[in-house]
Amino acid sequence: MRLSKARGALAVLCVVILFGWSVVPVSAATSPWRITKDHWSASDEKGFEEFVTRLGAEDCWSIDACMKSPANPYRHTDPKTAFMIDCADVPYFLRGYYAWKNGLPFAWQSTMQSSDGPRGDIRYSSGGNVVVGRSAVPATASGVSAVPLLFEIVNTVSTAMYRRNAMSDSRTMFTDTYSPRLDRAAIKPGTIAYDVNGHVAIVWRVEPGGRILIFSSHPDHTLSRSFIGREFLRTGPELGSIFQNWRPITLVGAKRMTNGTLVGGRIVGTPNADIPDFSLEQYVGNPPVNPTIWGMAKFVKDNEEMDFYTYLRSSVSMGELEYHPVDEVRAMMQTLCNDIHSRKQAIEISRNEGRTHLMSPPAKMPRNIYGTDGVWELYSTPSRDARLKTAFKEMHDQIREFVRMKETDAPRLNYAGSDLPGDMLKAYNEESAACVTDYKTTNGRRISLTIDDISRRLFKLSFDPYQCIERRWGATDPTELASCPDGPAKTRWYEAQQPLRNQIDRTYDVEMEYTVDQLERGPYGLESGRGVATAPEVDVKSWLESLTARASAMN
């Protein structure tokens, strides 16, 4: 299968909405893209980092809002338009936008070919994809109209672009990105984080303690902020996870006009060997192993062997990696708050724009609930909910690990208090109470939910856009659920989807096109496409309360 400039009617629709020029000629409303520099200098790259950092730090919840906010220094030069783009498009859009505003060259992969041949979804190919076509911004005397060109770029991009072999080094069909070294100089604002389960984010800040902050957009155009965690799976180099940096390019053979504009020439990509921070470290480990046995790689720093995610954080932190457990709990809770806030926006879009809750559900689920198109992609939340569940699970596991580290006097734990479970419980409760999300039931009653409330109903949250608002928020209390208008057919679907809600792993490579009868019959398991029988444990508050109660009883 090949992916080229046509991504189907939905993609075209999204891009028309993106730029809003279905009737008004774009060229009349926007400045041209003139190339005045033949390459991105160190100051250009630094400027791009600062641009991304400002967007990430802004209190905005869609790319459109961010681009129109004070975080974007170029906003006053933009046409009146709406920047409504999803996750895969964001890195290309921001890089292209910045290049346009600064007279820089830009090129992109225009066609990808799957290693699996003509069958299957190229976004989830088992052996990655190869570049078989490239395009670039034309270097012309008068420049080119920028918005239609950004239209073309966004219309080309999907997550298939990031699913490429990190060892690829073609001189002509080169990849847009390369695999960077794992350190603070290479993992920086603007670095792309690719989740092989079909999601793309951008690094906007690396904290002194090594936490890598990211933001990403979604099919409903909402923006979420989080940090790199175990939901970003480490794979072999053929699939391209996790980190990718933009490959340096040069416009060669161009003629400079008297006004400084470059005309003609061709784009040349810098080979991997000539990129100072190119490295396969995220695949081969340290000390390195053969990439073909990446699963056996070890990650050792200062004679200490670590798991990949600890090694990553240690490598990008300033100085020795230390965990301040109470601060870590607060940071994780605040990230969850952002995720819940973003989910609320998505549910409101589904309800107010899609109005899918008023529709009858289809006879079957999509071929795959995590990777699809149409109404389901726009208004369902299975991938978003899976990432939320993973974040709760990761916090649960990390808090338990902090207690274990305290009991074993682990050197990386920096805690001077006398009651770690009690202090973490206090932080949990304070952050939970500080983050209140509310929604209106069908009959207009307002329901307020803290983070802890969400935790307790986490696996009841419906991802199905055809379900009532009460079930989208996991209502089980008869009083709260009483206003849900769903009849027996929708209720049956909700109950049959419970194993899928129990599942936190996103399985894009299994068939899920089941009827409600087939869902009910099972069998269950990750490979079944029907979900799993039991949800993982995420209730860390109850566990901390049991520890503090036990300590009080002993005193």
Image (cartoon, helix red, strand yellow):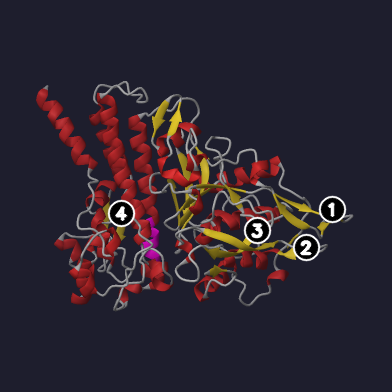
As helix, strand or loop, the secondary structure at mark 4 comes to loop
Along the viewing direction, whichever of 27 and 186 lies nearer the viewer: 186
Amino acid type assigned to the residue bearing label 2 in the image: Gly
The 10 Å Cα crowd at callout 4, few under 14, some 14 to 19, many 20 or more, is many
Mark 4 and mark 1: span between their CA atoms? 54 Å
Q: Which residue is mark 4?
A: 504
Q: Position of residue 397 (x, y in %)?
A: 28, 40
Q: Which numbered disc, 3 or 2, marks the residue closer to the eye? A: 3
Amino acid type assigned to the residue bearing label 4 in the image: Ile
Amino acid type assigned to the residue bearing label 3 in the image: Met
Q: Which residues are magenta?
A: 343-349
The 10 Å Cα crowd at callout 3, few under 14, some 14 to 19, many 20 or more, is some
Image quadrant in which the C terminus is located: top left
Amino acid type assigned to the residue bearing label 1 in the image: Gly
Along the viewing direction, whichever of 325 and 73 lies nearer the viewer: 325
Horizontal placement of 456 versus 208: left or right?
left
Q: Earlier in the sequence, mark 3 or mark 2?
A: 2
Mark 1 and mark 2: span between their CA atoms? 12 Å
**Residue 135: quarter of image:** bottom right
Q: Which numbered disc, 3 or 4, marks the residue closer to the eye? A: 3
Q: Which residue is mark 1?
A: 260
Q: Which residue is mark 2?
A: 143
Horizontal placement of 305 versus 75: left or right?
left
